[in-house]
Image (tube, rainbow, N blue to C red):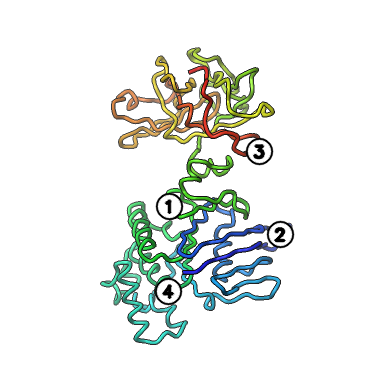
Amino acid sequence: MSHVRIEGLTKRFAGKPPAIAVDDLSLEIEPGEFIVLLGPSGCGKTTTLRCLAGLETPDEGRISLGDQTVLDAHGKINLPPNKRRIGMVFQSYALWPHMTVRRNIGYPLRTRRVAREQARTRIEEAAELVDCSALLDRYPAQLSGGQQQRVALARGLAAQPDLVLFDEPLSNLDARLRDQVRAQLHELHARLGFTAVFVTHDQSEALALGDRLAIMRAGRIEQLGTPERVFEEPATEYVAGFIGMSNRLPLRRQGEGWGLADQPGTDDPSGAAGQTGTAGQPGATGQAVAHELPVPRSHSEISARLRPDDLRLCPAEEEPPDHGVGLPAEVVDAQFGGRHMDVVVTVAGNRLHARAPLTGKPWARSLSRGQRVTAWFAKDAAIYYDADGVRTATHAPAAAVGA
């Protein structure tokens, strides 16, 4: 285990203008901590990982592993990967096809010139950790994808590195194997306590594995915190959208209250995009949403973010519960999801995703395109962001109208 410190890391790629992949990034990782770098393609997470590994040369910054400085751009220090005491698990497994599993796992030990008997012991210990002891004499072509990934993990741990780096290691596995290997990795980290940096674009992986999540955007960390904190209190609208709050309702101040903002040019099957209606009027495409949002009066426009699980549906003629904010909506698509229906609706030209439980609600099975429904959400389910995408309030107001 090793303490990791990244200070002012910057990496540019040549071009006109140059592309800044990592932008003055600083991060401290405690010994035994599992940090997840989460974000979409192009946000800088993999480049950051490659800089840690020594596979990229940063333009600026400093990296320390324990008491050893492995990179200092100003001091002209840049240790090669084999001098950094790291293990790395790649997306593509990267196993040598002409080597047995035993030799693949032992490869980093040979490069470090570990004595043969000690290497044999470490290989067998690493193989046992990931449940592939019976595969040691096979070749990669004789293994399934899940088995190959477990071998790659054993190789990354065999040399007992100070830091283990994971570059989207589960993305090539099918859904069942992905869940299985993810659970095994979580258990393995709990047992061994190695320090790790894990790169992914999958929020479910990040939430399950990370001690802390670093949500990245344009080469910087947008939010850093525990999975619970990031999930429940996304600091910016960018983070909210990436962590699962995919539903966005633009709101505009209307007198003392708030209403749905116009959405010109959106694809609204009802042909009513941009209109706003009044609470409780059947067939209206929008409505006054609330009076007393906990937002400074200086804001004239905000956006509300909701998760699909928090957006409920009921028949158009029904009123939502007293604690809910209701919005007239029209069904665009409905897909069977087992115990629920995954439904896309439009509200005043805004496409929203809802998950309608089927238990006790047989009407949801027959939802069809063009059907009028009421979309509603509990007042404490939404999080609000200002025009700059910064969170202004955590919960909906105590007094809402139009439900």
Determine crowd level at label 4: few under 14, some 14-19, many 20+ residues with C-alpha closer than 10 A: some
Image point (37%, 79%), residue name:
103
Q: Is residue 254 left or right of residue 92?
A: right
Q: Secondary structure at mark 4?
A: loop
- Residue 122's place in the image compared with 208, above or below, is below
Q: Quadrant of residue 261?
A: top right
What percent of the width, then of the height, locates residue 252?
A: 63, 25
- Residue 107's place in the image compared with 12, above or below, is below
Disc on the earlier residue, 3 or 2: 2
Q: Which residue is mark 2?
A: 18
Q: Nearer the viewer, mark 1 or mark 4?
A: 4
Disc on the earlier residue, 2 or 1: 2
Image point (35%, 64%), residue name:
191
Q: Which residue is mark 3?
A: 388
Image point (29%, 67%), residue name:
131
> Looking at the picture, which amino acid does disc 2 mark?
Pro
Disc on the earlier residue, 1 or 3: 1
| Alpha-carbon span between mark 4 and mark 3 | 45 Å
Q: Nearer the viewer, mark 4 or mark 3?
A: 4
What percent of the width, then of the height, locates residue 17?
A: 73, 57
Do labels 4 and 3 touch, CB within 8 Å?
Answer: no
